[in-house]
Image (spheres, rainbow, N blue to C red):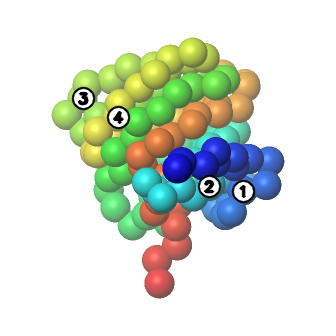
Amino acid sequence: MSSIIRRSFESPEESRPVKDGMGQVDLVNLDAGAVGRATFLPGWKWSQHVKPIAGTDSCMASHVGYTISGRLKVVMDDGEETEFGPGDFGIIPPGHDAWVLGDEPYVFIDWQGMADYAKPKG
C-alpha cells in the first residue's frame, strides 16, 4: 500500500547557497530524486554566481519546472532564448546561461535538475 509523502521547502533536507549571497537552492529528497526550489535575487546570473561552483562554461543541468514568482531570461549556447514568469512551466536543456530580470526574486520549483546544482565539487 502506498503512503502519503509530505516534504516542506520551509525545512529542506539541504540548502545550497550561490556565490555572493545571490540566492540558494533548497532540496527535498524523494525516492525518485531531489526536488529543488531555487530562489535567485535580482542581479543573479548563472555565469557569475553558479559557474564558479559548477566549473562548466554553461549550465549543464536539465531543468523541468514551474515558475512561482519573478522573471528569468534563458539563453541557450546556440542562441535560442526565452523568458519565464509566474505560472510558466518550462523544460530547459543543458547548455544555457540565465539571469533574473527586474527587481523581484525569481522562484522556481525544479523536478529534474537540482540534485547536483550549485553543489561544490569534492
Mark toward the start of the polypeptide (3 vs 1): 1
Which residue type does callout 4 highlight?
Ile
Element at label 2: strand
Residue located beneath label 3 in the image? 79
Label whose residue precedes the other's in the sequence (1 or 4): 1
Mark 3, other Cα within 10 Å: few <14 / some 14–19 / many ≥20:
few
Q: Mark 2 or mark 1, which is nearer the start of the sequence?
A: 1
Q: Is residue 59 visible?
A: no
The residue wearing badge 1 is: 12
Residue denoted by label 2: 27
Residue type at numbered disc 1: Pro
Mark toward the viewer: 1 or 4: 1
The residue furthest front is 1
Q: Mark 3 or mark 2, which is nearer the start of the sequence?
A: 2
Nearest to the eye among marks 4 and 2: give it.
2
Q: Measured from the top left, where is residue 31 in percent x and y?
A: 48, 58
Q: Report if the CB atoms under discs 1 and 2 are less than 8 Å apart.
A: yes
Q: What residue is rendered at 29% in x and 39% in y?
A: 93
Q: Are marks 4 and 2 in contact (CB under 8 Å)?
A: no
Under tag 3, what secondary structure? loop
Q: CA distance from mark 2 to mark 3?
A: 30 Å
**Residue 72 against residue 22 in the figure, above or below:** above
Q: Which residue lies under the disc numbered 4?
A: 92
Secondary structure of the residue carrying numbered label 1 = loop
**Three-letter amino acid code at disc 3?**
Gly
Instruction: Please identify the quarter of the rendering in which residue 91 is found.
Output: top left
Counting residues from the start of the chain, the first of labels 4 and 2 encountered is 2
Packing grade of label 2 (10 A; few <14, some 14-19, many >=20) is: many
